[in-house]
Image (cartoon, helix red, strand yellow):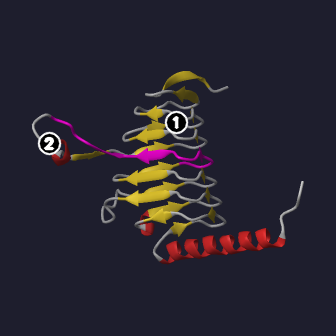
């Protein structure tokens, strides 16, 4: 197997410096925490409402969107040693809390915002609904999952790739499907 050439090594160093500058820019705009974290190119409209634990890794293309930055209950908090894969999306109207040692695979959406859908008004005029989302410690979310408002995923639980979670999951269980349902206990 060939070793990387000098040009590839230089390119990777430049990209790494760019990520460091991006992280520094988020810190200047109010990002809290993040000691010893590895943050690639992410977007966050209100970094002062994003709280990172220690030793987190967030890959390229992750989008943190906070809709009500002046509401004290609207924030995203990541625990220590959280991994977030590329192209994940966090849509926050209420708090989103991710516990310690969680893995969130690429292309996952965590969205705690929705709309009412009563017949008495057009759908685009319906009130917004929002409930907190909590992932307790040691949770693994597979790739391309969707986690919806009001969900708590218990400590040690696993959600299989491609699942849509619309109700809370107890601790140490494996769930899968659309909508997600109980598969087995984690042993």
**Residue 149 pos. (x, y %):** 37, 41
Residue 143: give its label.
none
Nearer the observer: mark 1 or 2; the answer is: 2
Spot the residue most to the left.
Answer: 120
- 62 up-or-down from 128: above or below: below
Q: What residue sits 65% from the left and 60% below the top? A: 55
Q: Which residue is mark 2?
A: 122
Q: What residue sits 19% from the left and 47% below the top? A: 124
Q: Main secondary structure of the magenta part?
A: loop
Q: Residues within 10 Å of mark 1 (few under 14, many from 20)?
A: many
**Residue 168 pos. (x, y %):** 43, 33
**Residue 186 pos. (x, y %):** 63, 27
Which element type, helix, strand or loop, lies under badge 2? loop
Q: Earlier in the sequence, mark 1 or mark 2?
A: 2
Q: What residue sits 62% from the left and 61% below the top? A: 54
Determine if the magenta segment contains residue 186: no
- Residue 81 quadrant: bottom right
Q: Which residue is mark 1?
A: 154
110 or 71: nearer the viewer: 110
- 145 up-or-down from 23: above or below: above
Q: Identify the image quadrant of the C terminus.
A: top right
Distance between the alpha carbons at the discs numbered 1 and 2: 37 Å
Determine if the magenta segment contains residue 116: yes
- 53 up-or-down from 5: above or below: above
Q: Residues within 10 Å of mark 2 (few under 14, many from 20)?
A: few
C-beta proximity under 8 Å, tags 1 and 2:
no
**Number of marks:** 2
Stretch in magenta: 99-118
**Residue 136 pos. (x, y %):** 53, 42
Which element type, helix, strand or loop, lies under badge 1? loop
Q: What residue sits 33% from the left and 61% below the top? A: 72
């Amino acid at each position: 197997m060939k070793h990387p050439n000098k040009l590839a090594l230089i390119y990777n160093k430049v990209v790494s410096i760019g990520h460091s500058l991006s992280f520094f820019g988020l810190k200047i705009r109010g990002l809290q925490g993040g000691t010893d974290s590895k943050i690639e190119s992410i977007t966050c409209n209100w970094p002062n409402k994003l709280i990172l634990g220690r030793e987190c890794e967030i890959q390229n293309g992750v989008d943190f969107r906070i809709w009500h930055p002046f509401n004290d209950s609207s924030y995203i908090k990541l625990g220590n040693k959280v991994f977030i894969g590329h192209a994940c999306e966090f849509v926050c109207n209420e708090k989103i809390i991710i516990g310690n040692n969680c893995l969130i695979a690429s292309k996952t959406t965590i969205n705690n915002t929705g709309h009412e859908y009563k017949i008495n008004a057009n759908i685009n005029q319906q009130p917004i609904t929002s409930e907190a989302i909590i992932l307790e410690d040691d949770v693994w979310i597979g790739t391309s999952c969707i986690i919806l408002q009001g969900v708590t995923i218990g400590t040690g639980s696993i959600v299989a790739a491609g699942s849509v979670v619309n109700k809370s999951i107890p601790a140490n269980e494996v769930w899968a499907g659309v909508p997600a349902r109980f598969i087995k206990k984690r042993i």
